[in-house]
Each structure stands twice: as C-alpha cells, then as structure tokens.
Amino acid sequence: MTTTTDFAEVATRLSASRPEGQRLRHIASEAFGPGMTIERFKLDNGLTILVERDASAPVVSLMTWVKVGSRFEKQGKTGLSHLFEHLMFGETEMTPHGAFDRQIEEAGGETNAATFLDWTYYVQNLPVSALGLGMRLEAERMARLVLREPQVASEKDVVMNERRQRVDDDVDGAVSEALYREAFKVHAYGIPTIGWMEDIEGFTPDDCTAFYKTYYAPNNATLVLSGDIDPEKDLGTLLDTFGVLAPSEIPVEDMHPEPPQVEERVLVVEKPTSVHRVAIGYKSPAFGDFEHAAMVVLAEILFGGRSGRLHKKLVRDKEIATEVRGWVGTFRDPSLFDISLTAREGTTAEELLGLFDVELDKVLEAPVTDDELERAKARLELGTVQSLETAPGRAESIGFYETVLGDPGAIFGKLEAYRRVTQGDVLRAARTFLVKTARTVVLVHPNGEPDEELDEEDSE
Amino acid sequence: MSALTVFTETSNKIPVVSFAVGFRVGSTADPVGKEGLARITARLFRRGMVSLGAEALEESIDRLGSEFGADASPSSSSVHGECISRNVEAFSELMSRIIGEPAFAEDELGRVVRETQAELVEARDSDRSLAGRAFRRTLFAGHPYARRVAGTLASLATITQADVRAHYERAFTRANAVVAVSGDVTESDARALAEKLVSRLPEGTKNVDSVGDPAGPKGRHLVVVDKPERTQTQLVIGAIGSRADDPDHYPWMVGNTVFGGTFTSRLMQEIRAKRGWSYGASSRVGFDRHREAFTMWTAPAAKDTAACLALELELLGELAAKGVTDEEVAFAKNYLVRSHAFDLDTAKKRVHLPFEEALYDLPPGYHTDYVRHVEGVDTKAINAALANRVKIDDLVIGAVVTQAEMGTALAEAIPNLASKTVLAQDFE
C-alpha cells in the first residue's frame, strides 16, 4: 500500500525534470470515510486531481468535473453547456470524429457525461490497462477540440431529439421544466439544462467555440481517479498529458440571486396524460447550508420508501395516488424541495394537493417521532454506503462533493450531519421551509377534460 | 432434503450484505385470464407476514437499514434484499419470514391489485412501454411471452386469495430456489444465511417449464399505438431471436455488438452520428429460458420517422446479406472481452453470473466462461449466424405515433407489409 509520504515523494520526483509551470504537487491526504483516503494533487496549470486508490478490481474510473452548467447561461442561449457536453465526444486536432468513443470501447471502456445546473462531468470507466489512453484523450479534448459543421448541426439534431424524448413527449419532464421556470424568475436555476428548443436550434460553431474557450481549462476542472491505479506510472502519464495544458482566465460568475418568494405560484397545465399529476417546489436551502441535513431527513420521513408518511397516507390508506416522490435539491445555491405526486384515475390534481397539504401541516404542528427519525437515518446510511460500492460510484461522489462543496469526502460529513439531526431540527426546518407563500405548484390535467379553466394559465 | 443451489461471493469493500433468491416459476405459468398472478404474489410479500402486518413490516425493513424487493419475470420470480452488515442476522431472519410466512391477507390483496391497476393506467404515459408491449403481443402472439407480466385491468380483478396461495405453494419451494449471498460476510456465514433464507419453505418439486419456443408471425407486421401530440416516435423493430443453447447464440451476440451493441455500432453511426435522427439507437439479442426477441430501438422525431425506419430496414438487410467484416469482429471481441472486467468488479455482480445461469437453465458456463465463448467466435461463424437468423422478411414493427399525422407514412416506409394494426393508447 502506498503511503501519503509516497504520493508526495512520487509527485516531487516525477516533476523534478519538468519545466516550471508543468509540475505536480501533492497537497494533502484526506480521509474518505473510515477506511479510505483521497490524495489531493494540483498541477501548476491549476488542475485539481483527486485520487482514491483501490485494488479490489482491475478497473478505474476517470472523471472530469468542469465548473460549468446551466446556471451560467442566459435566456436566448440556453442549453449550451449541455450541447457542448455532446460535442466533447467529437473531433480533436489529433483524433478524427468518432474515434474518441471507438478507441475507448475497443479498450473495453465506456464513456458518458452529464450536465446539470452547477456542473458538467465526463466519465470514462476503464479496464486499468486503458487508463493511459483515457487520460491522453481526456487531455486532448480539454484543449484541442475542433468545432465545425457538419458535426455541430448533427449534434444539435441529436440534442433536439433528446429534448423531445425527455421533455416534450414526457409528461414528468415537461412538468419539471415548468416547475423550475415558475419557481425561479431571476436565478438561472429556472433555465432548463437541456435548453429551449429554439435556442438549441440557433447555436453556431462560433457560439460553441466561445463557450469552450471561456470554461474549458485545467484551472476550471477537477480530475478524479478512483480504482486500481499505479501511482508512479499513472501520475507520470498525468504530467505528460494534462501537465502541458495552459490555464485560462475564468470569468467571474455573473450570478443573480433569486429574490425571496412571497406569494404562492400556481400553474395549471393540460397534457396528454392518462392521470392527473401535481408538482410542488418549496424553496429549500443550498446544499452547503446547515439546515440542508434536517431537510433531507424530513424528506426521508415524508417520502422515503413505503413507510414514508406520504406513501402511507396517499398511496396506501387513501388510495388516491400511485406515486409520491420528494427530493431536496443538492445545489450550490438555494433550490427546491422538489415534490411530485401522481394521482390515480378518478382523483383530480386539486384533490390530491388538498390531501397532501393536510399531511404537510402535520409536520408543521408536531415533532416527528423518534422512530421515524431513526428509520430515516438508517435508510440514509444504507443509501450512502451503497453509492460507494463501485469505482464509478466513488469517483462520482468525490467529484460531486468537491465541485459543489469543495470537500471531496463530504459524503461522510453529510452522513454524520444526518445522524446528528434531532426532532427539533426537523420541526425547525419544516417551519422554516415548508411555507406555502414560498412554494410553486403545477397542477397537471389530462387533455380534453371538461373543465373551463384548463388553458395554460398563471395564477399570478 | 435436497441440496440447496447456493452461490456466494465475499467482499468487505462496503459494510453491506446482499441476498437474492430466485424461483424457477414466473408469469408464463399464470393461468389464462389470471395474467399478473405471479407478480401480484411476489408483491404481496411486502404486505405482511402471519405475525407482522404490512406497515409494521415496512418499518422493520427501514429500521434495520435494509431494503427488500420482490418481482416476477416471464420465467422466474425473485426476492432480493440488502442490509447494513451489522444487522445481517436480524435482516436475514426477517427475509426468511417474509418469504416463508406470508399472510396473503384479503384486504392486502385487494389493495395491491388496485395499486397495480392504477400503475397500469399511469404506464400509458410511457411511450417506450407502449411500443414495447404492442411489439411483444404481436411478435409472440399465441405464446405466453405475449402476455403481460403485470397483467391487465381485467385479469388482475379476477385474482383471488386462493389463486395466490396456489401459485405460492407451487413456485416458492426449496427445490425451485436458487440463492445468492454476497458482500461483507464470510463464505461459511454466507452459506448458513442462504440456508436460513429458505428454511421456512417446503421441499416441493422442481418446476418443469413446459413452455415451448415461440414461432413468430410470417411476413412484416406493423402495430401502431395511436397517441395525440407525439413529436417523436418510439420505434421498435424486431423478430424472433435466440436461445442461449443455440450453437450460433454467441456468434449472433457478437455480430449484434457490431450492429447495435455499442455507442459506436453501425446503428449509432448511421442514425445518430451521421444524421442526428435519434438520441439512442441500439439492438439486442435477448435471452431467457426460451427463445426471446431480437430488437432494434430508436426514437426519431416524427418528421424523420419514415426515413429512419426505411434506413433501419436497409441496414438490417445489409447485415443479413453481407454480414460483418474481420475488422468489426476484432473490435467487438476486444470490447466484449475487455469490458467484462465491469461484470466482475463487485461481489454482487460476480455472484449474479452463476445465479442467473442456474435460474434460467442457461448452458453451464454461459456467463462464467464468457471470455472463452467470445474469443472462440470468428467472422465466418458470425456471418453464418446472421444469414441464418436475421429474417428480414419476418419482422414486427411497433411504434407510438399520432396516427392521423404519421400512420400512412410509416406504413409506406415498409416494403411488403403484410398487416397493419392500430391500437388505442389504452389497449390491454
């Protein structure tokens, strides 16, 4: 087992023969839960590297987290972060179009990527023998991507089809988009990550190039390596590939906070759906906020599994819903306690919302029980541990927590915070955040129902 | 008492123990008119035991930091659970009681039937699910695979306590069980836990699956689900596929990897990369205890659907007529052999391979000798399999479209179409 000292020594030795500006420094060894360690490195060009070494399987997950997502976008140019994520699998100065994926697949790897509000990540899950190839290709596309027609036009078509699949022809996707648009009037969290169709259609190679030059640079990214790495060999390859990249000047984010919401917003929409649905968003704390842990525990008590209060009441006892879901946003800025309810045939969205409110009022009036609290904590513990079983799972956790909270091992800090949550904390969080005047509701009615008020309308 | 079929894999990477118990009876055994029985029986496990009601059971599962699930597929029923390892004794005892002492209470049966019926109604909102169901009921017409595992609104309403009890007694026996235990547990403890899981079940007799292979219809058949406001088409094209014990099963599987099995396959290149017509484009040679389907899936915009369908038929015809190249085969074999590391990187994945072999009567070594199987395939064998198995004149095409806008163009894109059926979105 390589020790902390070994990593520092390896970084120093590998850097000795390299010019200034292309060297690697070992910054720290950071605990990753009870039995694992994350080694933190930094290249002179500003790239942060986080290594979690695990020899239990001959695989490695290589992730690149870039600090750009749809929160950086403006109306009229929405969806560029996501479109760009697609284009990152294209041509580079050294690799022809299509060769990136082909080479990774032939080596036995798989690639993927995701874009969301605060971040974009790229993942390569590789047999350990292919890590060198993966790093070379990843470094190439960070600095040497070629953006031109017809690839940009073709990828726009792909993304428009993705939008049709995930949003336009999908009721849940369309409703979620409407919820965030209504809830955030100023903050860019109201912009759909996939972008508005007309914006996607309008992007040019020049738009993409400008975006690339602005945000894709080593000093705006974190590289995560989780798995069976060979420090000597793989850190050497890292220096050869990423070490030579130049940093950029990353612009200061032009962020506009969302003003406090002081009035409930209700949107009624008609969709080609077989049943009524309700989406609700309560303004909720940022992921780094102290109150976030109590909100997560509260969400677990309300929505966690079949013994959650809402499932028990609306699905089991009253038999008016088929599904109830609730999730507290894990974003850098305050976002939503994002709730969706699906009615059974014969129940209207308004009736479902009425019974939902009755249940919500109960957590505002009286503390949750000790038993509910303990069950919620046990469920959260299992979920946390399960997410770390594979190298890709650990890499994702490390990259996500580093990018959003600046602490790659914070998943364990979160678990500790959940364990500390008391009944009083839950009551306080409920009374602070489950405020009707700070919520947005989307009521979804099936098309063609005999109701006079079914046109898309905003009650405000 | 017969020897129990048990597979174990240990790993202390995370403090979690996983359990799976498969039983060799699935929804193909549902009596005609009682479709959904196997799945309802499985779902009732969560709805209470003789000594513990449904709500208390759910709370017990949560309190132990554990999760439990049960479901049915055409050829099997299964239960699975996972728990924080410090609670393994208590959870395995609970799981043993869940499957060995179910209450199958009348009120809970009614509740789960109504819940399942409501889910069937809601599932009409999923175009992919609609396309898949329309496709399967046409391709497998007359065969149990054509029937829905989840049942229909009408069939679910006929299921009685006696039906559930009879199905349970036939299916959930020690003789039918295959057990997998993996994770943070020693080998000897894993075996003891496996025995405990099934300790409350009767010996029973091993189920003989008398279902035959499906034949599939002759000619090309289009089945359209008519749904309003579709901007995109969920499109599935397919035919009768392979059996795991076919001599050319692996050659076809490797050939399919070239055609539609990876992100850079022919389908992805032609449909997504070159034309941008669909976000995804893939094909699959499925397997089960009996001959399953070969399928190709795309989701083109409504305006591109006819052209996309025509191109897919052309590509499939070319595959059958000309086969694949040595270069493509070398790529596919490298991909399959090297990526196999990700089938083995956790204890739960490793134990799943022999577990599935035993549960579905797959040929010995089907998964566990996977690398040798793949490496043993060559271009000649693949092209012979493709020429023999890919029947381009006997296809079923399933699609969800707005019929008034798209139906005619879709039918016209299919040469030699033998039949066209239009279904309402609430078809059963």
Image: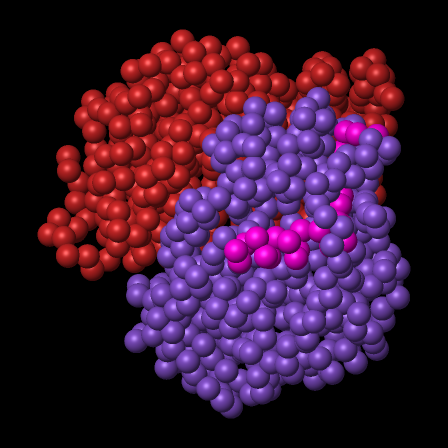
Chain colours: A red, B purple
Q: Residue at x 54, y 61 (%)?
A: B149
Whether residue B163 appears in magenta in the rendering, the answer is yes
Residue A317 position, x and y percent, is 36, 37
Residue A452 position, x and y percent, is 11, 52
Whether residue A234 appears in magenta in the rendering, the answer is no
Answer with left or right where residue B167 lies relative to residue A202: right
The answer to whether residue A136 is above or below residue A171 is: above
- Quadrant where the N terminus of chain A sits is top right
Instruction: Find the magenta span and give its range.
Output: B162-186
Question: Does residue B259 appear in this view?
Answer: no
Residue A117 position, x and y percent, is 44, 34
Q: Looking at this view, name the residue that lies furthest to the left.
A: A452
Q: Looking at this view, is A414 or B298 the one in front?
A: A414
The answer to whether residue A140 is above or below residue B122 is: above
Q: Looking at this view, is A43 or B158 the one in front?
A: B158
Residue A380 position, x and y percent, is 55, 25
Q: How many marks?
A: 0
The answer to whether residue A226 is above or below residue A292 is: below
Q: Residue at x 82, y 60 (%)?
A: B366
Q: Residue at x 79, y 80 (%)?
A: B384
Question: Does residue B12 appear in this view?
Answer: yes
The answer to whether residue B322 is above or below residue B28 is: below
Q: Residue at x 21, y 33 (%)?
A: A265
Q: Looking at this view, is A140 or A458 the one in front?
A: A458
Q: Looking at this view, is A106 or B149 the one in front?
A: B149
- Quadrant where the C terminus of chain A sits is top left
